[in-house]
Image: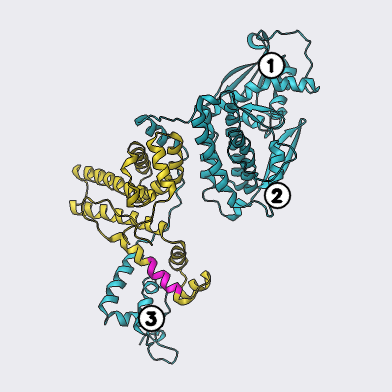
Chain colours: A yellow, B cyan
Amino acid sequence: MPKRDVPPRWDRKMQQRLARGEAAALGELYDRFASLVHGLAHRVVGDEHAADGITRDVFAHVWEHPDSYDPKQGTLRSWIAALTNRLAVQRLRTTETAALARGGPGTPEDLERKVRHASVAARADYIVQSMPAPLRAALELAYFQRRDYHQTAVDLGVTDDEARRRLRLGLQLLATAHDTEAPGAPPGIGGAA
Amino acid sequence: MTDEHRAANGPDGTPLVLEHHVLKSLLGAWALAACAPAEAEAVEEHLGDCGPCADEALRLREAVGLLHRPESLDLDPGLRTRVLDSCLERRPARIPVPEWAAGYDAETARLDALLQDFGDSEWHAPVRLRWYEADEASTRRTTVAGVIAHLLTVDGLVAVALGLDDPLGDVTPARPTPSDRTEAYWRAAHFPPTRSVRAPWREQSHALVRTVSFTGSGTGRMTVPYGDFELPLHDAMLDRAFECWVHAEDIAEAVDYPYDPPSGRHLHRMVDLAARMLPSVLEHRRLHGLAAPVERRLVAAGEPGRSLRLEIEGSGGGEWLIPLDSPAAKGSAEHEVAHVALDGAEFCRLAAGHVAPREAAAGQVGDREAIRDVLFAAASMSRM
């Protein structure tokens, strides 16, 4: 996976159209990214209604501040995923803090653990969705279909060596979901490999 | 030694001996429990001696814990409108989507969401298109992908009128009508349509919404030729929204998915288009002997004439007075001779040719002939 994907023309063009205030562009943006945004948000907060609200906030942010996306830093997709993760984690922390303040169970440390766990899980989902399809297919067979690497190789029509390589590389990418960023830095979703 | 342990040995009972680079290459498979038992044993043996491999093995094992069967969460189809409305409230659009194109925007997005998770079996599921021709129910068999190809080619009429590319390319239909264009497109393909038709259909529908947003008010007089007739651009976009919903229902039925009618706001405009078209359809049918001749009380243009009150119930409903004797006459409550009441979605299914005029669930009061004429005229507006 390249360190920084070069943003395709579509990303720059979309940013210009949003900046121009074109409602049709907002619709297209939603159509392309809504299921990504909603899925990641749901993974963090685990609640349909809250995920709807985060989805609304993410698109509102992009629509109101299209210039805050810097194409030099990566794709629009990865930027939106990072923004989603940030807003979802914020919301989770707010609701959990409120629950704790009301005398709910757990300690502030439990809360931080939970928030961090949810954030890592969402990053992992994004990494799986964004990794090269051959790696994803290998993981899918080995993990979800419980095929061993030899059967995986046969299913994919590759050598045993190649199947082992794909499984290892796929997991190496996935493991970067655990990498922490410097505080304040934008969460480097997917680009941290 | 347990049985399990014995299985970890090579065929002759001795432990497998593998080189370091092989052991390292096995770490991913090992973490996923996707190695042969003997290999797993060899890897584990190695991890006791090799720090870097032990670190990586731990890291990869943890990564396996992050794998997660993606839940196929269907997005609430109503969320799109709510999200977009909330955005536009915070920052109004400088270039809005015209209200008459909003239905098309919403319906194409809804259909696209329905197609999202379709596999090959859904794309190739048989669909029977139904409409009325010469007051007879007509059908045509195709597949889900074939329906999308149909929408692509007929939406293409609007695209061509706006100066965009014709999805038919070099294919020339016998006549530039919706059905001829569709048949020509189906015929020209070497294979039956597949899921690959989704992207061009979606790209074109996005391009239409984008383009009409820019042409804006200047498009008031622009017309879209349909071969046998033409519609103002505004109405053509309503017609395409209507067709998109009707065929989305065909598809949903074919694959046994639930599918809701459009929002009241959009449904109202679709009903309004049909109600506005009814007088000239009635006139056309009269000229061809399909509707009762009028005892020609000549109605001067713009004057009130005999009328049928069309009452549409439910979300998006309303009342329309349909002048019966001439498209130029004005609908008039004083000259009301009949009253028909039916649900908005039912009326649209009638106009789509999915419900027989005689079987439409309609409350009816008054001149039976007038009612019959209007219900048949509504069904006759349907096409492939």
- Circles 2 and 1: CB atoms closer than 8 Å: no
Residue drawn where x is 50% and y is 73% of the image: A158
* Res B35 visible: yes
| Circle on res. B22 | 3
In whole angstroms, how far apart are the C-alphas of marks 3 and 1?
Answer: 83 Å
Q: Is residue B257 above or below residue B104?
A: below
Dot 3: chain letter: B
Residue drawn where x is 32% and y is 55% of the image: A189
- Circles 3 and 2: CB atoms closer than 8 Å: no
Q: Tell me the crowding category of disc 1: few under 14, some 14 to 19, or many 20 or more residues within 10 angstroms, Cα based.
A: many
Q: Is residue B343 above or below residue A182?
A: above
| Circle on res. B188 | 2
Q: Secondary structure at mark 2?
A: helix
Q: In x, y percent, where is residue B90?
A: 34, 31
- Residue type for callout 2: Ala
| Marks 3, 2: nearer the viewer | 2
Say whether residue A166 is magenta: yes
Is residue A116 or residue A77 the one in the foreground?
Answer: A77
Q: In x, y percent, where is residue B327?
A: 69, 16
| Quadrant of the image containing the C terminus of chain A | bottom left
Q: Secondary structure at mark 1?
A: loop
Q: In x, y percent, where is residue A51?
A: 36, 44
Q: Tell me the crowding category of disc 2: few under 14, some 14 to 19, or many 20 or more residues within 10 angstroms, Cα based.
A: some
Which comes sooner in the sequence, label 3 or label 1?
Answer: 3
**Prevailing secondary structure class for the magenta stretch in the rendered image:** helix
Which comes sooner in the sequence, label 3 or label 2?
Answer: 3
Q: Is residue B245 left or right of residue A53?
A: right
Q: From the image, tell me which residue sits under label 1.
A: B327
In whole angstroms, how far apart are the C-alphas of marks 3 and 2?
Answer: 53 Å
